[in-house]
Image (cartoon, rainbow, N blue to C red):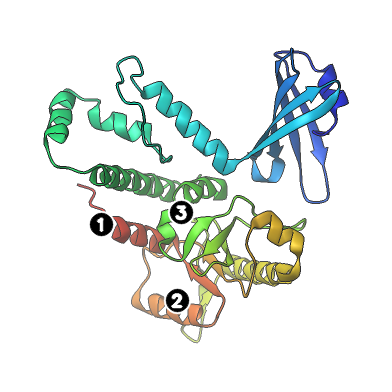
Amino acid sequence: MSDNAEYLNNYKLDTIYIHPFENKNSQGKYITLVISKQIKLSIQAIYIDNKKDIVKFELIKIKNGIVEEKITLNGFSLKKIQDFLNLLQNLDLKNSSKEKIKFEGNIDINNIKSIFNNKNSKEILNCILDSDISKNTIIDTLEIQKRNNAIIDFEAILNNEDKNEHDWQKWFKNNSWVFNTDFIEILDKRTIDASNITDFLAKSYDGFVDIIEIKKHTFSFWSKSTDHNNYIPSSDLVKAITQCAKYIYELERESSNTKFIENNGIKPIKPRCSLIFGRSNYWNEKQKEEFRILNSMYHNISVMTYDHVMDRAKKITNYNKE
């Protein structure tokens, strides 16, 4: 539909139109707004139902009833534009004497505001200006504070039994740093094929694609019963591991699929899966030992609990609640 100028020609100015679509890979909605009548310029957002998110925008220019030009913005480009607009709102452009301002994206305006939004803001600012603190040091400090705030959010979700996988998906999407060197990038797309949609596909440190699967933190890790005094994985954990194995199998089948490689910009070779499941805060020594044994059974699946993730995050940031 987005290529059909007939629809757009009939759209009125300053009216939002929402139309569903469905194809073999996904279903969702086109959200369209005509922003200029003279040259028939419209902006169209593409929303994917199973991702619960807008994956791209298209600027469409129509001339003589024909689509003359189309510009597509993906998630990364949109984030850059959003950061740029946020920066413009907070810059004192009237009094600015600079001809160039270095823009690197990922600017957290709220973090900057939180530092100076207090009665001592002038003293803090003057101290920074008078010191030899480098720009990189300030940026690093802001990033550490941002990560510390993320850990606080993590603990809040962890201690709330009403939170679900969707809440965790949002947290991990915004805080991929917690995976440290395991993954260098969370990919925008999560779909292996029409029947298999992961929580995350990620680019590993060696340049190939791996899987991250997250389950509820409220799921029991161990079964209530033991076998010969040995702890047994819960049925929910067994199901989750089986699902990971299925995803690995299906993703490996895409290694020769040119369309998958083009869409994701990365090739799946012997993919691995990281599964985040349940809690371990009250484990005894035997449970910790048997967790180690459990993980050694799988050469391409790594299981960790939310408490393991939190411990890792605190070690990365040298987190100190005080």
Question: Dividing the picture into quarters, in which one does residue 51 lie?
Answer: top right
Q: Which residue is mark 3?
A: 176
The local crowd at label 3, few if under 14, some if 14 to 19, many if 20 or more residues have their Cα within 10 Å, is: some
**Residue 159 image point, x, y percent:** 40, 49
Residue underneath mark 2: 291
Figure check: 132 above or below 206 = above
Asked whether, in this view, residue 167 is left or right of residue 124, the answer is right
Q: Which mark is residue 207?
A: none
Image-based side of 245 in relation to 115, left or right:
right
Going by the numbered disc 3, the residue's amino acid type is Ser
- Whole-percent x, y for residue 42 in the image: 72, 23
Tally the numbered discs: 3
* Disc 2: CA contacts within 10 A as few (<14), some (14-19) or many (>=20): many
Front-most of 310 and 55?
A: 55
**Residue 283 appears in the rendering:** yes
Is residue 196 in view? no
Quadrant, the N terminus? top right
The kind of residue on which mark 2 rests is Phe
